[in-house]
Image (spheres, grey):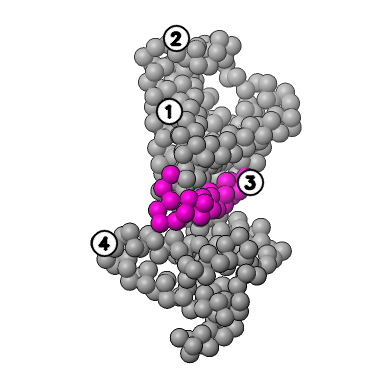
Amino acid sequence: MENIINQATGRGFSALPFRDLQELALLYRQVAADLATVREDPASARLAEYLNQLLGRAHNLIYMGERRSRGGIRDFYERVFPETFRSTIDYTALSAALFVAGALIGFLACLGDPSFQRYFLGPRMTETIDQRKMWTQSVLAMKPLAASGIMTNNLTVAFSTFALGITGGLGTIYMLMFNGLLMGVISAACWQAGMNGKLWSFVAPHGVLELPSVMIAGAAGLLLGRGLLFPGNLARRDSLVLYGGKASRLILGIIPLLVIAGTTEAFISPSPMIPAAAKFALASAFAMLLTIYLSRSGRQAPLKDFLPTARAGRFESQGVSEAKDSR
């Protein structure tokens, strides 16, 4: 199976004769069955990892040759993105832990040394907070332009966090902890000024979408770093293709979330006309919908690791029985 995949790498199905396509379908199912067996033995963890990576390469090859339908974007957001999120949730959890660690450091540093707040936030924002005022008044004066600017900034932060994974994950870790540090400093400054209610009624409506998106972008960057530093039994190039593919699906998946978050941050979050209770209610609704979407969407036809059996079945219908006889 590995030899067949190597023949097709970079050239797709056109590099394979029909007989090899038949053989690939048979071997795909056999290796999938072997992987299920090997996973039952804790001592065979390295073998299980190798087989899973081999199936991952086969998965990329199979779907690279698939003609995209008009419903591809819809299928991506209904099935592919949430499934990818669930399969890489450990990386998102690590990303969230780094963000929270940065926030705690910023919060405690600000409480321990008040000058840290002025150094980090700048004198203008610090003076605004000291006057018990929010710094978001400028957003209300030009909502459409502000929405565009906020979306651009959010997308820039997310894509930078992802792209810096190519540094072995160090750049991603920096971005996560820096943004967490900023959140911690602002939280401490507003807490000391007695502005907790104002701060969280502003952050909550858009933050329940924006902060998870940043953490998912962090997970994408960490995946990219994993593919670069720990290729396992794969060639480093193949490892980057495998983990980079997962990372790309994550970063593309959060774009609508950041667009909604940016619009909410410009039109709803800073508005004094909307009661705080209504903002928290909207935040709760966003959080509930996001949780349901990420945890439930796409479960009707689940994928386990890299085992797209329905697609492989198309090869089998083209004459795998002949390949079995030839063996």
* Badge 4 or badge 2: first in the primary sequence: 4
What is the spatial separation of the Cα atoms under label 1 and label 4, in whole angstroms?
38 Å
Stretch in magenta: 229-255
Amino acid at the residue labelled 2: Ser
Front in this rendered view, residue 256 or 251:
251
Q: Which residue is mark 1?
A: 103
> Mark 3 and mark 1 in contact (Cβ < 8 Å)?
no
Q: Amino acid at mark 4?
A: Pro
Coordinates of residue 39 in the picture (x, y in percent): 32, 65
CA gap between label 1 and label 2 equals: 17 Å
Residue 132 appearing in the image: no
- For mark 4, what is the residue? 42
Q: Is residue 46 above or below residue 223?
A: below
Q: Which mark is residue 295?
A: none
Contact flag, marks 1 and 2 (Cβ < 8 Å): no
Q: If you read the primary sequence from the N terminus, does the residue marked by circle 1 or circle 4 appear first?
A: 4
Q: How packed is label 3: few (under 14 Cα within 10 Å), some, or many (20 or more)?
A: few
Along the viewing direction, whichever of 7 and 305 lies nearer the viewer: 7
**Regarding mark 2 in the picture, which secondary structure is present there?**
helix
| Residue that mark 2 sits on | 115
